[in-house]
Amino acid sequence: MTIINVDHINPFLMASSKILKEVCFIEPKVGKPFIREPIFLDNTLLIIIGFTGKMKGQVMISFEKDIALDIASKMIMMPITEMNEFAMSAISELGNMILGNTATIFSTQGIEIDITPPTIGTGTMSFSYTYTKNICIPLVYEENKKIDINIAIKGD
């Protein structure tokens, strides 16, 4: 099982915070990281993006559906009340921007990674990893709204 280095986690958090501030106009606070079994309940929306290169793994950005609607509304700058194709496109693009920025941060450290196109998942899901643990870092905004950044990195 791979031990995850904090230097490999920080670029994901830096990029997530930057994009949420610039695109959604929110100031997220980083919560305490924890090992999470990658099990998601019915009220969850996931953005799943893999990465490969000098590091391999995947990121799952998870939200409760009402938080996903709030984020889509902030991105589009108008109220969104249902997770339609337009809202899904915005949420998908959020994942692209976060992982694209993460790849840029890693490249400044000499770590080249490529990202996969985002996949959106909804409903009850569970995943298993044989190569690592899933680290979950909550990002909290507006007191009680939470976005979870789930990171699984395969070691060398």
Image (cartoon, rainbow, N blue to C red):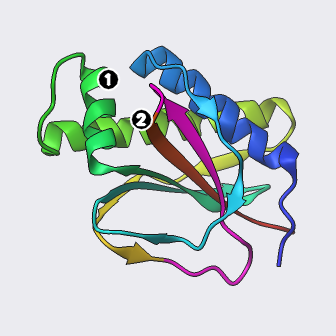
Q: Classify mark 1: helix, strand or loop.
A: helix
Q: Decide if residue 130 is on the left or right side of residue 93.
A: right
Give the class, few, some or many, for how many residues have Cα within 10 Å of label 2's Cα (few <14, many ≥20): many
| Residue 117 horizontal/vertical position (percent) | 43, 51
Give the residue type at disc 1: Met
Give the residue type at disc 2: Leu
| Residue 102 horizontal/vertical position (percent) | 65, 37
Q: With respect to residue 153, does 64 lie above or below?
A: above
Tell me which segment is drawn in magenta.
127-143
Q: Classify mark 2: helix, strand or loop.
A: helix
Q: Which mark is residue 75?
A: 1
> Residue 95 occupies which quadrant of the picture?
top left
Q: Residue 156 carries which label?
A: none
Task: Report if residue 103 is visible in the image.
Answer: no
Residue in view at x 28 percent, y 60 percent: 43
Image quadrant for the N terminus? bottom right
Q: Badges 2 and 1: C-beta atoms under 8 Å apart?
A: yes
Residue in view at x 53 percent, y 49 percent: 148
**Number of numbered discs visible in the structure rendering:** 2
The residue that disc 2 covers is: 94
| Residue 25 horizontal/vertical position (percent) | 43, 15
Task: Report if residue 85 is visible in the image.
Answer: yes
**In this view of the protein, which residue sits in the foreground, 62 or 112?**
62
Q: Does the magenta stretch include residue 37?
A: no
